[in-house]
Every structure is written in structure tokens, then in C-alpha cells.
Amino acid sequence: MAEITITPLSGSGSRAATVTTLGASDTFSYQDGLILVINNVTAGAITPNLLGDAVTDVPVAGVGSVDTSGGYTTASIGVGESAVIPLDTVSKYLTGAVTVTAGDGAEVYLLAK
């Protein structure tokens, strides 16, 4: 289990981005403003899942309680394709330490605005 390193985007000019090749299970700590880029360099489609270890049901007005315990699973990412996830948009799935699974071999970048 590897820790996914954050690349800060503060300041001006270019910077080197830290890439992490996903294994069976990798982790990061969610914070506001993070963007996750997933680059599928594997030989098949992937559907990575992101799950915080402290997620709970989320009350949604007009809907009721929504179960977030299964985490957030991306749409299928084909061979040679990439996906960009502004993590603020799925933050209720990311409470606590976040584990990324089902993306073995893909390259990820975790960017901080």
C-alpha cells in the first residue's frame, strides 16, 4: 500500500508533478481543493474506487439518507484514456484516510490547487 503524493500547484510557473503507479491498494489524505488525475496505461479498462475509512450515510434534502459506504467508483477508463476528478465534487465519499483500489498499474497525479 503506497501513499499517493500531492503535487502543490501554488506559486507561478511550471513544476514537476509526482506520479504514483497504483498497486492493489493506495492511500491519500483528502483535503479541499485536490484534483486526482488517473492515466490508464494498463492493457485493459479500469474502474477505480475511492473510499474514505470514516464515511457515513449522508442526508440529502428531498431524497433522505444516501449510503456512501461503497465509495466513489469512476466511470470506466479505457486503455490510453485519462480521467480528471475534482475531489471536492465527491468529498462525502472521502472522509478519513482514502484508499484507491481497482486501478492496478494506472498512473495517478494528485494535484493541490
Image: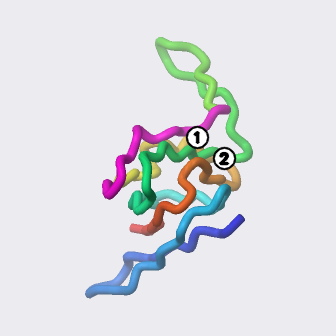
Q: Is residue 31 left or right of residue 75?
A: right
Quarter location, residue 111: bottom left
Q: Is residue 18 left or right of residue 5?
A: left
Task: Inspect this view and state whether residue 36 appears.
Answer: no
Location of the N terminus (image quadrant): bottom right
Q: CA distance from mark 2 to mark 1?
A: 6 Å
Q: Position of residue 42 (x, y in %)?
A: 45, 59
Task: Inspect this view and state whether residue 46 appears.
Answer: yes
Q: How many marks?
A: 2
Quarter location, residue 97: bottom right
Q: Which residues are magenta?
A: 69-81
Q: Is residue 78 left or right of residue 27?
A: left
Q: Which mark is residue 93?
A: 1
Q: Position of residue 10 (x, y in %)?
A: 38, 78
Which residue is labeled 2 in the image? Answer: 52
Mark 2 in CB contact with mark 1 (< 8 angstroms): yes
